[in-house]
Amino acid sequence: MPLRVIVAEDAVLLREGLVSLLQRFGHETLAAVGDAEELVAAVHTERPDLLITDVRMPPGNADDGLRAAVALRETYTGLPVVVLSQYVERSYALRLLDSCDGTAVGYLLKERVGAVADFMATLDRVATGGTVVDPEVIQQLVRLRPDPLERLSAREKEVLSLMAEGRSNANLAARLFISEAAVNKHIGNIFNKLDLPVDTDGHRRVLAVLTFLGA
């Protein structure tokens, strides 16, 4: 489905490359801006289906892009956002994933844009409410935050790691060479061991991923 997208990136070549890539896949770029103030104004004016933004942007050249994205998700609840970062930064990932229960967000290293098919699939997943986190970010967060994951078996951690990448149950089964029934059983065990109550069923998958990431 074609998306209406705003691109916020201060590096001109990457910004133009993203616009070109979106056009190639049939998406519409509503605005392509180079600083956080222009980003906020564009979202207020255009109300996009998806925002793609860098973490570090003018005018402060700090985490202006990320802070703008989090604030906009509070104003426009659940605004789908894909944040691109040059480096793995744990605090940035957690701040983004803390917003709006961690739904409709992606946190990727910029180098992932080069894997075009995967990158475009990520945009589609986030735009439809999914959560996608760069595998390198996941690995670093896991090393830093062992609890409460100690309750999980090695296989359950593997399943949860793949869930955090935004993969479906069918994809999990194919990756792990097990049946979907086995995947469902592992996910049920994960929910129980992480003490996720049944009455949050619609969000248990997201809550499990947030727990995994240390939120």
Image (spheres, grey):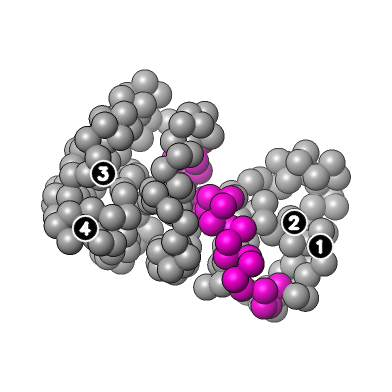
At numbered mark 4, what does the secondary structure look like: helix, strand or loop?
loop
At numbered mark 3, what does the secondary structure look like: helix, strand or loop?
loop
Give whichever of discs 4 and 1 has the lower sequence position.
Answer: 4
From the image, give the main secondary structure of the stretch colored magenta: helix
Q: Which residue is mark 1?
A: 154
Q: In the image, which residues are magenta?
A: 120-149
Residue that appears at 39% across and 49% down: 86
Instruction: Give the image location of residue 95, x and y in percent.
Output: 41, 68
Give whichever of discs 3 and 2 has the lower sequence position.
Answer: 3
- How far is mark 3 from mark 2, CA to CA? 33 Å
Mark 4 in CB contact with mark 1 (< 8 angstroms) = no
What is the crowding at mark 3: few (fewer than 14 residues within 10 Å), some, or many (at least 20)?
many
- How far is mark 3 from mark 4, CA to CA? 11 Å
Give whichever of discs 4 and 2 has the lower sequence position.
Answer: 4
Mark 2 in CB contact with mark 1 (< 8 angstroms) = yes
- How far is mark 2 from mark 1, CA to CA? 6 Å
- How far is mark 3 from mark 1, CA to CA? 39 Å
| Residue 158: image tag | 2
Q: Which residue is mark 3?
A: 9
- How far is mark 4 from mark 2, CA to CA? 36 Å
